[in-house]
Image: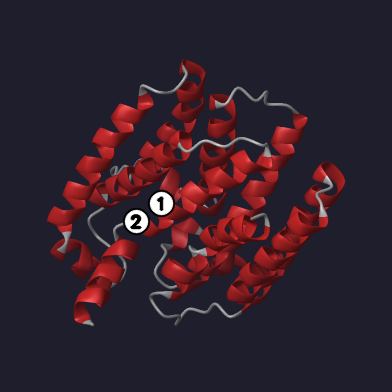
Amino acid sequence: MQTIKRLFNFYIFSSIHVALGVFCFVKLTLKNFGVEENITALFCFFSTILSYNFIRFLNESFEKDWLSNWYRNHKSLLVIISFISAIIVLYLSFSFRIESLMILLPFFILTLFYGMKLPRKLVTLRRVPGLKIFLIAFCFAGVTVLFPLVQNEIDIDVIIWWFFLQRMFFVILITLPFDIRDVDFDSDQLRTIPQQFGHFTTKLLGLILILGIFTIELFIFGKEFNEMFILLTICSLSFVLLLFSRKEQSKYYSAFWVEAIPIFWLLLLLGLNF
């Protein structure tokens, strides 16, 4: 049992779980536009492991003692998995068009400057008040929407930008439970949404985001019943998890259950369309 628990913790806290979520987001994008391929999704999977661990290596001090201790105890394994991911990312990058890699460049730069630990006198992206959640959503949408579509030679038109905005809304929605969890640990400089407006307004924002997601879906895409049912199920699950999120949540509540939403979304889509 202890071995299973250690493996489970490594799966979550080594960024494999969130990387699998990114993989599923890319697959959802490609399926939405009728494309069946896995190279871009695999590239994003290993890039996520690499980038998340890169940020952790640049910022070795963590807010929570138990998490800090876990990273210190598993640093060698994290270096190994990050090194393997870097090799795979480099190998897969030769499969991509120059235009696709150029699309990734601004998101790579944003991730780099978000993760860099600079002197306090300098203003970094991490210290810009209120920016954190929107920067995360912007980068997630760029990597999981624009990159796979450009790679598969789908023109970026107005419809794609609406899809990009919808993905941003959804990423903000599932990031809010993390901000609620970290309200006492995040620096006051960050001025996250729960820090500025409280838990009730944060959860109300989640409901507004869901309305925005459905408005775009109905008036821009006009999907079939099955797809609308899946979106309703996923948004309802996301809102329930947001509704019950609090500061004193389990360490698995957001890190596993909330991060699992895109995985469940893809499984539900595959199951209903089997």
In this picture, residue 226 sits left or right of residue 164: right
Q: Is residue 170 visible?
A: yes
Q: Residue furthest front?
A: 274
Residue 15: image tag: 2
Q: Are marks 1 and 2 in contact (CB under 8 Å)?
A: yes
Q: Position of residue 84 (x, y in %)?
A: 22, 41
Relative vertical location of residue 272 with respect to residue 40 in this rendering, above or below: below
Residue at the (45%, 57%) spot, across then down = 189
Describe residue 274's horizontal placement relative to residue 133 as left or right. Answer: right
Looking at the image, residue 236 lies above or below residue 95: below
Which residue is most to the top? 98
Q: Using the rendered view, name the quadrant where residue 82 is placed.
A: top left
Q: Quadrant of residue 46?
A: top left
Q: If the image is split into quadrants, where does the N terminus sit? A: bottom left
- Neighbor class of circle 2 (other Cα within 10 Å; few <14, some 14-19, many 20+) is many
Q: Residues within 10 Å of mark 1 (few under 14, many from 20)?
A: many
Query: Residue flagged by tag 2: what amino acid is it?
Result: Ser
